[in-house]
Amino acid sequence: MDLTSWKWQIGAAWVLVVVLIGFAVAPTSAAGWTLCAGAAMTLPGIFARFWRQPEPSMSESIRNALR
């Protein structure tokens, strides 16, 4: 399993947990729902910004060049 798959799975699980907590707490104002949406997108945003795919190794680069 590659890192991209892990990133999507962890991000989706995080969003689902925050949404479920949001429905359990049931914010009554638009500010509460905005805070819930912001919290749900925090971890996937961090993943998108800082968790990059590693650079290909030398053997991967050579193999791709020969294709």
Image (cartoon, rainbow, N blue to C red):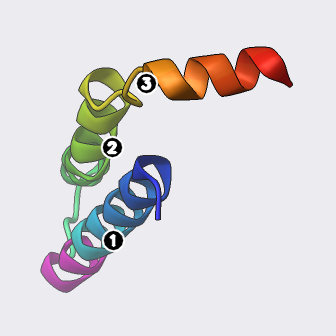
Q: Which amino acid is tagged 3?
A: Ser
Quote the CA–CA distance across marks 3 and 1: 30 Å
Mark 2, residue position: 44
Disc on the earlier residue, 3 or 1: 1
Queried whether the magenta region covers residue 24, the answer comes back as yes
Looking at the image, which residue is at 22% across and 64% down? 28
Q: Classify the position of the C terminus by image quarter.
A: top right
Quote the CA–CA distance across marks 1 and 2: 10 Å
Question: As displayed, is residue 54 above or below residue 16?
Answer: above
Disc on the earlier residue, 3 or 2: 2
Question: As displayed, is residue 35 above or below residue 49?
Answer: below
Q: Residues within 10 Å of mark 2 (few under 14, many from 20)?
A: many
In the image, which disc is placed on residue 13?
A: 1
The answer to the question of whether label 3 and label 1 lie on touching residues, with beta carbons closer than 8 A, is: no
In the image, which disc is placed on residue 36?
A: none
Provide the residue span drawn in magenta: 20-25
* SS label for mark 3: loop
Q: Is 7 in front, or is 35?
A: 7
Q: Position of residue 22 (x, y in %)?
A: 22, 71
Looking at the image, which residue is at 80% across and 19% down? 66
Mark 3, residue position: 57
Looking at the image, which residue is at 35% across and 73% down? 16
Q: Position of residue 19 (x, y in %)?
A: 31, 70
Q: Which amino acid is tagged 1?
A: Ala
Quote the CA–CA distance across marks 3 and 2: 26 Å
Q: Residue furthest left?
A: 25
In the image, taking residue 34 as reference, residue 67 lies left or right, namely right
In the image, taking residue 65 as reference, residue 16 lies left or right, namely left
Q: Residue furthest bottom?
A: 24
Q: Residues within 10 Å of mark 3 (few under 14, many from 20)?
A: few
The answer to the question of whether label 3 and label 2 lie on touching residues, with beta carbons closer than 8 A, is: no
Q: Residues within 10 Å of mark 1 (few under 14, many from 20)?
A: few
